[in-house]
Image (spheres, grey):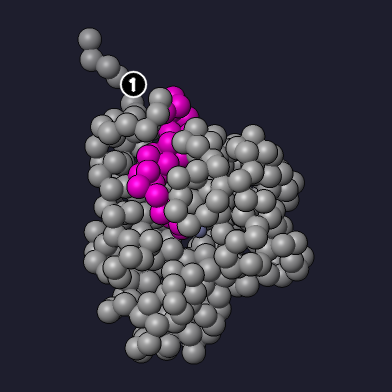
């Protein structure tokens, strides 16, 4: 008899062109997305609908950034800082990643959810500054665009191990948007030590916090956001609180990311997921585990190749 059980489907926004820039030794490297693409393409637990993004236009970027910043990115010649090079065509790469966030939002409004698996990440980019591997504030752009579509309360949840300082700088004190970040402290960029403005809730977490303790911070952040009754969720999905991550010192394991996926699902509202950090070779497995949790699939049995 034919198995009529339909697999759940995840729309994923991806274009391999985002793997076409790199600098030797830089942790934000093409292999991050290439191996994640391969993992999602070959796994059997859920269906993936692949969608290709288009470049975000000035009008969209101006939601979050100054015209000066947009011009500087367009004309980029010298590196923005030691972590954030002026790669060839970085303006196009950053715009494509921002455009993917916009497409993820539009897709989530139709289908309930979508994941942008593009680089560069965005949550450190402030209105006027590219920093920390980030050039454009993708999550803030998605949230502001979501708000303009008539949502009453847009929640931004950032579980990357680094504070989402750029997102916070863009949306601080914005009406109808709330932001919560769980992050290692002390750690780059050194911000997010306490709540900020009327709508930014920060959960600094000491290095090497055991996973069971780390989960309590995430639970608190999620509950704080839920208490504001959001009707749209934008997630800055960073996977660098993993025990094997080379640039941070936290201890989360594969199953913790599965659990985070379940926590995000528990909002039960349209949800946009945007890839931020995650620099270990296991990133592809962590992303997969997170979506197994989010989509209500069985938990992963461990890190294994397909
Ligand atoms: Zn990070």
Q: How many numbered marks appear? A: 1
Position above or below: 26 against 245: below
Residue that numbered label 1 is attached to: 5
Q: Can residue 77 be seen in this view?
A: yes
Q: Is residue 171 visible?
A: no
* Residue 67 shown left or right of residue 117 in the figure: right
Q: Split into 4 quadrants, where in the image is the N terminus?
A: top left
Q: Is residue 279 magenta?
A: yes
Position above or below: 272 against 120: above
Q: Which residue is drawn at 69% across and 53% down?
A: 203
Depth check, front residue: 176 or 119? 119
Q: Split into 4 quadrants, where in the image is the C terminus?
A: top left
Q: Residue at x 64, y 43 (%)?
A: 209
Depth check, front residue: 72 or 211? 211
Could you say where residue 121 lies in the image, as x and y percent from the top left?
43, 63
Could you say where residue 134 lies in the image, as x and y percent from the top left?
45, 70
Could you say where residue 218 lies in the image, as x and y percent from the top left?
64, 44
Q: Residue at x 38, y 62 (%)?
A: 28
Q: Alpha-carbon neighbours of circle 1 within 10 Å: few (<14), some, or many (≥20)?
A: few
Badge 1 residue CB within 8 Å of ligand 1:
no
Q: Is residue 290 magenta?
A: yes
Depth check, front residue: 192 or 128? 192
Chain part drawn in magenta: 273-300
* Residue 184 shown left or right of residue 292 in the figure: right
State the SS at label 1: loop
Depth check, front residue: 51 or 119? 119
* Residue 223 shown left or right of residue 280 in the figure: right
Position above or below: 241 against 196: above
Q: Residue at x 31, y 77 (%)?
A: 87
């Amino acid at each position: 008899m034919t198995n009529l059980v339909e697999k759940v489907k995840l729309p994923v926004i991806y274009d391999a062109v985002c793997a076409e820039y790199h600098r030797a030794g830089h942790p934000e490297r093409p292999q991050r997305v290439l191996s994640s693409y391969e993992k999602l393409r070959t796994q059997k637990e859920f269906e993936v609908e692949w969608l290709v993004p288009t470049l975000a236009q000035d009008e969209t970027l101006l939601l979050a950034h100054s015209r000066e910043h947009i011009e500087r990115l367009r004309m980029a010649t010298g590196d923005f800082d030691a972590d954030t090079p002026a790669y060839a065509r970085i303006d196009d790469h950053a715009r494509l990643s921002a455009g993917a966030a916009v497409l993820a939002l539009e897709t989530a409004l139709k289908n309930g959810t979508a994941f942008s698996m593009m680089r560069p990440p965005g949550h450190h980019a402030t209105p006027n500054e590219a920093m920390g591997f980030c050039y454009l504030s993708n999550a803030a752009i998605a949230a502001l665009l979501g708000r303009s579509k008539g949502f009453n309360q847009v929640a931004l949840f950032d579980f990357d191990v680094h504070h989402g300082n750029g997102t916070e700088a863009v949306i601080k004190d914005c009406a109808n948007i709330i932001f919560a970040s769980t992050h290692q402290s002390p750690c780059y960029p050194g911000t997010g030590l306490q709540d900020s403005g009327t709508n930014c809730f920060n959960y600094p977490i000491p290095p090497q916090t055991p996973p069971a303790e780390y989960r309590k911070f995430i639970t608190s952040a999620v509950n704080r956001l839920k208490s504001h009754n959001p009707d749209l969720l934008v997630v800055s999905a960073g996977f660098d609180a993993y025990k094997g991550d080379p640039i941070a010192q936290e201890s989360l394991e594969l199953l913790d990311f599965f659990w985070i996926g379940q926590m995000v699902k528990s909002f039960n509202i349209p949800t946009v997921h945007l890839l931020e950090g995650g620099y270990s070779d296991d990133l592809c497995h962590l992303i997969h585990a997170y979506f197994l949790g989010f989509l209500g699939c069985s938990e992963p049995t461990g890190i294994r190749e397909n």
